[in-house]
Amino acid sequence: MTTAATATAEQIKSAIASYQDKVDYLEIRVEQSESTGLSFRGKQLDSVDRSFSLGGGIRACHNGGWSFVTFNGLNELNVRIEEAISQAKLVGKEETQLAKVEPIEDFVPEQIKRDPRSVSLQDKRKLLEAYNEILLNFDPRIQTTMASIGDRFATKTFVNSTGSCIVQERLDINGRFAAIAKGEDGVVRQGFESVHSRNDFDVLVGIEDRVRGAAERAVRQLEAKSVKGGQYTVILDPYLSGVFIHEAFGHLSEADFVYENPKMQELLTLGKPMGIEQLNVVDDATMENQPGSMKYDDEGVPGQRKYLIKNGVLTQRLHSRETAGKMTEAPTGNARAIRANYPPIVRMTNTAIEPGETPLEEMFEGIKEGVYAVRMLGGQTNGEMFTFAAAEGYMIRDGKIAEPVSDVTLSGNVFQTLQDIDAISSDTLYTNGGCGKGGQMPLPVSVGGPHIRIKNVVVGGR
Ligand SMILES: [Zn+2]
């Protein structure tokens, strides 16, 4: 650990020590970061940013009442702690219920392969410009592009009034590539690709084919005819099955949502059958090199691998210490914040459907007329209901992938849709994403899954 990080931790520890008797619970988080970001829009270099920052947040809880106060420098710490304590006392009216967690002292370094901080802005620009050229020059129908790369290294310090002191390093390296194509009839289509690493700048090197794929998909969609609306057997590719399980189901597993919603408590009673026996859904913070991975969450609770659905049965939900305490369930290490100057709330980490046993080729067998939905364009959820637009689609005819179709939107009720999954393939793929909730976005997560086959899906065309 650097001497600066040690000094910061010591300073926060002694501040907590002098106030911890005055309140039920007190916690201070500090995050020191350095980041760079570059982006192109069309031919133009849109932005070049390089920044250093220090920010933090104090949470206090008294008689069940919470306060959250932010700060930008450690010299104002005591004043801010006093503010946090008096605000918590103002709102507290019941009993503080926090699931118990053993005190932890730990330092978690990031094991970096090629450090983005050792790469010059000039070299990063050259790399990005070359990818942007690939997108722009792919086809005359490509109208514009959005291409960006970024990296952020942060040292996160966590200290609470029950004896935990955790310092974690975190590195994120991102590349995002979008191509927008326009057809003769004025139809606009887009293709998208993204890459992410927690430890290696080289994830951005040598990805010409993946970047070109974004332009290929945009142009291919121009040539596809709109799908005919109706009910179909649908196969989702791993990108879409991952997004489906995160968006439609994962958010409902977040206990802050369940706790406040009596109808959802009933729909999400643990032990309830959710689907076929091969259906397993996992939220796993312990995976290597994934955006949602972490040793400890932002409440100092160890990250875990949890089955939300095991053998088709609802087994667990995602908790912060408060939701676990209130629902008398075990904490799961799912309290996360996008930065230290935001409060931790219940969030997912790396969420996936586990692969099943059906070979991919067999998934398509026996489908007379169906739809193969590929990658995600956008979507929305409203409680149990969801609507997703696939980035690409293909008809399935007599068990074979047939002509491409566009405007594939899938909608339904998540619980019914989970019941309607009738086959799960043995392949799997994880992809990175940014999750939004409670004004905090994008939070790094990943979503994953195999191909899944679903009966009776309502597919909307144009
Ligand atoms: Zn989300």
Image (spheres, rainbow, N blue to C red):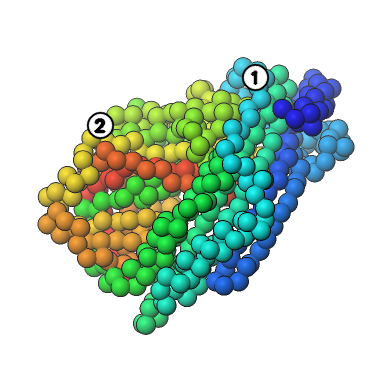
| Residue 249 vertical position relative to residue 64 in the rendered view, above or below | below
- Residue 57, how many percent across, how many down? 73, 38
Q: Is residue 242 left or right of residue 371?
A: right
- What kind of element bears circle 2? loop
Mark 2 near mark 1, Cβ–Cβ under 8 Å? no
| Residue 198 vertical position relative to residue 286 in the rendered view, above or below | below
Residue depicted at x 30% and y 50% = 236
- Residue 157, how many percent across, how many down? 71, 31
How many neighbours does mark 2 have within 10 angstroms: few (below 14), some (14-19), or many (20 or more)?
Answer: some
Q: Is residue 378 left or right of residue 459?
A: right
Residue depicted at x 61% and y 33% = 110
| Residue 93 vertical position relative to residue 423 in the rendered view, above or below | above
Residue depicted at x 83% and y 37% = 74
| Residue 384 vertical position relative to residue 40 in the rendered view, above or below | above
- Residue 394, how many percent across, how many down? 25, 61
- Residue 303, how many percent across, how many down? 53, 28
Amino acid bearing label 2: Glu
Q: Which mark is residue 374?
A: none
Q: Of circles 2 and 1, which is in front?
A: 1
Q: Nearer the viewer, residue 24 or 193?
A: 193
Q: Nearer the viewer, residue 178 or 343?
A: 178
Q: Is residue 401 left or right of residue 244?
A: left
Q: Which residue is mark 1?
A: 104
Q: Nearer the viewer, residue 368 or 203?
A: 203
